[in-house]
Amino acid sequence: MQQSPSFLAALLGLCFVLGLIILCSYLAKRFIVPKINLSKNGKVADLELLEMKQIDIKNKLVLCRCKNKEYLLLCGEKSVVVDQFEHKVEE
């Protein structure tokens, strides 16, 4: 006769799989998504994402460059341009 798996073993297995899914999504969000190139067809992108910081659940600060200008954006329920400045080429 075979024993049926216990409810506790099934619950622990489900928690383990959900934990792996959450860990993979966190790692993808943290390391893969910010590195995606915004250019198409191998051209140099006009818009470049430099940095992104999460402020809270709904809001984040985004630093991006577009045509030799850098913009600091507050993205969330109401998106706002916080600052705009010229990009200085470092020598």
Image (cartoon, rainbow, N blue to C red):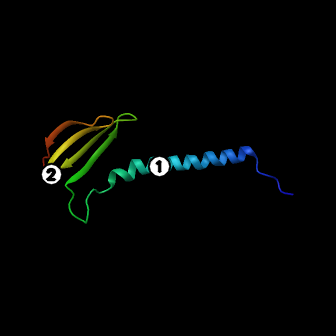
Q: Mark 1 is on which residue type?
A: Ser
Q: Amino acid at mark 2?
A: Lys
Q: Could you tell me residue 84's position as x and y percent?
A: 16, 39
Q: Identify the residue at horizontal 53%, vertical 50% (top origin).
A: 21
Mark 2 residue element: loop
Residue at numbered disc 1? 25
Residue at the spot 76% in from the left edge and 47% down from the top edge: 6
Left or right: 47 in relation to 16: left
Few, some or many C-alpha atoms within 10 Å of disc 2 (few <14, some 14-19, many ≥20)? few
Q: Residues within 10 Å of mark 1 (few under 14, many from 20)?
A: few
Considering the image in quadrants, where does the N terminus appear? bottom right
Query: Residue 60, how many percent across, how many down?
Result: 33, 38
Q: Residue furthest bottom?
A: 41
Residue drawn at x 40%, y 35% is 57
Question: On the rendered structure, is 25 left or right of 50?
Answer: right
Q: Residue at x 66, y 45 (%)?
A: 12
The residue that mark 2 highlights is: 67
Q: Residue 52 falls in which quadrant of the image? A: top left
Reading the chain from its start, which is encountered first: label 1 or label 2?
Answer: 1
Q: Nearer the viewer, residue 88 or 82?
A: 82
